[in-house]
């Protein structure tokens, strides 16, 4: 039985690695908003509160090139076994990616994935050690995405902050 893993996970992990190739950002429509501090409560627990011990959730967003959406979907319909293995070795489970259209632009939304390891930087970076993922998979999938304004240098996906969680 084949295990399927959405490409967005691989792309997000690629963004976490030092091998990311920055793409031109989508033009910003307005200036950056001022930061707002997190507010924690019963429906937005502090990080790791209410989660299984050792589980941390990550979510992110990236633009999707509409001209390459078909290819992106085809690649994710049957993720290569080497890529799946690299993701699993990095202690990543329960990964979800959605596509949506907002104001005429397409976006990939990684609702969240669960990280069950103890050193995310090391584990996420380990995916770049897999030559199939790094040299074949990422170049295909990365070319389907558009970096968003405010995405960190060297990253592909822009991280999102959790503001509500109801287990």
Image (cartoon, rainbow, N blue to C red):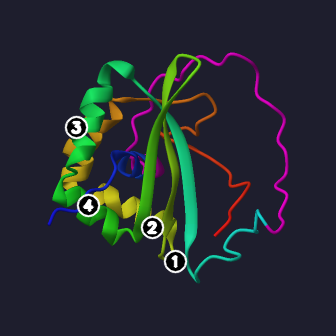
Does label 2 or label 4 sit earlier along the sequence? 4
What whole-number distance in Å separates the C-alpha atoms at marks 1 and 2? 9 Å
Residue 43 location, quadrant: bottom right
Q: Of the numbered discs in the image, which one, if any, rests on residue 118?
A: 1
Q: Of the numbered discs in the image, which one, if any, rests on residue 122?
A: 2
Highlighted magenta segment, given as a residue range: 14-42
Q: Quadrant of the N terminus?
A: bottom left
Which of pointers 1 and 4 indicates the residue nearer the eye? Answer: 4
Residue at disc 2, secondary structure: helix
Q: Of the numbered discs in the image, which one, if any, rests on residue 107?
A: none
Does label 3 or label 1 sit earlier along the sequence? 3
Does label 1 or label 4 sit earlier along the sequence? 4
Does label 2 or label 3 sit earlier along the sequence? 3
Residue at disc 1, secondary structure: loop
Residue hosting label 4: 84
Position above or below: 114 against 70: below
Residue hosting label 3: 74
Residue at 82%, 41% (x, y): give it: 35
Q: Is residue 124 left or right of residue 162?
A: left
Which of pointers 3 and 1 indicates the residue nearer the eye? Answer: 3
What whole-number distance in Å separates the C-alpha atoms at marks 2 and 3? 30 Å
Position above or below: 46 against 112: below
């Amino acid at each position: 039985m084949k295990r399927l893993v959405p490409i967005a996970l691989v792309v997000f992990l690629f963004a976490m690695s030092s091998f990311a190739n920055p793409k031109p950002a989508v033009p910003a429509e307005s200036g950056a908003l001022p930061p707002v501090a997190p507010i924690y409560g019963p429906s937005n627990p502090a990080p790791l509160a209410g989660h299984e011990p050792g589980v941390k959730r990550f979510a992110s967003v990236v633009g999707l090139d509409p001209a390459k959406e078909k290819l992106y979907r085809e690649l994710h319909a049957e993720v290569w076994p080497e890529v799946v293995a690299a993701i699993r070795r990095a202690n990543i489970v329960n990964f979800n990616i959605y596509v949506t259209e907002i104001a005429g632009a397409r976006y990939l939304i990684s609702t969240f994935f669960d990280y069950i390891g103890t050193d995310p930087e090391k584990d996420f970076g380990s995916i770049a050690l897999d030559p199939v993922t790094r040299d074949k998979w990422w170049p295909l999938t990365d070319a389907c995405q558009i970096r968003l304004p405010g995405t960190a240098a060297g990253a592909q996906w822009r991280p999102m902050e959790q503001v509500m969680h109801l287990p």
